[in-house]
Amino acid sequence: MDDSQIIALFYARSEQAIVELEKKYGGAVRKTASNILRCSQDVEECANDTYLGVWNTIPPQDPDPLISYVCKIARNLAISRYHSNTAQKRNSDYDLMMDELEEAIPSSVNVESEYEAKELSAAISEFLRTLSYEDRFCFLRRYWYGDSVADIAAMMHGNAHRISVRLFRTRDRLYRYLKEEDLL
């Protein structure tokens, strides 16, 4: 079933929409959540919460592409659950991934207004447009979807060390880009 048919089921308020969404994107939802959460029970709860979130937002939303919309909801729910589960603890994989970006992107404490946050977001999006497909793929898989360097290397049929170097160089270019744009 294609995305438009699934969305039409949501608009018709048919419970079959959830079934079809889970069939088509259940793996992506679980992978997105499991990259942040390590407990399989939390991942399953996050997946169910994701489907409920999609149910509650379509309509009025009409997402295109559907997979990005669904994975964004899953990611946000997983991050919220991660923070509630790990207050005063550290999840080394997720924290390491965020620490890698810390030098290139200012923390939310440094962003003083919503306007500046939108400006920063727009600058990062513009920076991503300047990257080659491979660099953008690696960056988004690591820092949006939370994939491990080894997983990204496998997806690209490459070497984990090369992916690490590629990510380091991309973070460095992002840092320099943000400095040039006076956002740091």
Image: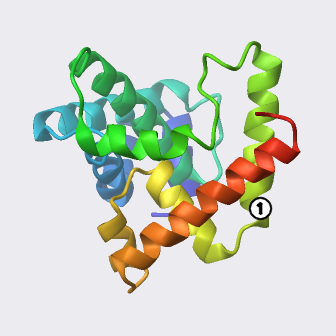
Work out which quarter of the rendered image holds the C terminus and state it: top right
In the picture as drawn, the residue positioned furthest to the right comes out as: 181
Q: Is residue 76 left or right of residue 123?
A: left
The location of residue 173, given as percent across then percent down, is: 70, 59
Which quadrant holds residue 74? Answer: top left
Q: Residue at x 36, y 55 (%)?
A: 28
Q: Nearer the viewer, residue 15 or 118?
A: 118
Instruction: In the rendered view, tell whether residue 154 sits above or below residue 98.
Output: below
Q: Which residue is mark 1?
A: 129
Type of colouring: rainbow
Q: Residue at x 80, y 52 (%)?
A: 126
Instruction: In the rendered view, tell whether residue 134 sits above or below residue 31.
Output: below
Instruction: In the rendered view, tell whether residue 44 sits above or below residue 5.
Output: above
The location of residue 106, given as percent across then percent down, is: 64, 31
**The residue under label 1 is which amino acid type?**
Arg
| Helix, strand or loop at mark 1 | helix
Work out which quarter of the rendered image holds the N terminus and state it: bottom left
Q: Nearer the viewer, residue 12 or 105?
A: 105
The location of residue 111, given as percent across then percent down, is: 70, 20
Q: Nearer the viewer, residue 101 or 140?
A: 101
Q: Is residue 75 left or right of residue 93?
A: right
Q: Residue at x 39, y 70 (%)?
A: 152
Q: Nearer the viewer, residue 7 or 129?
A: 129
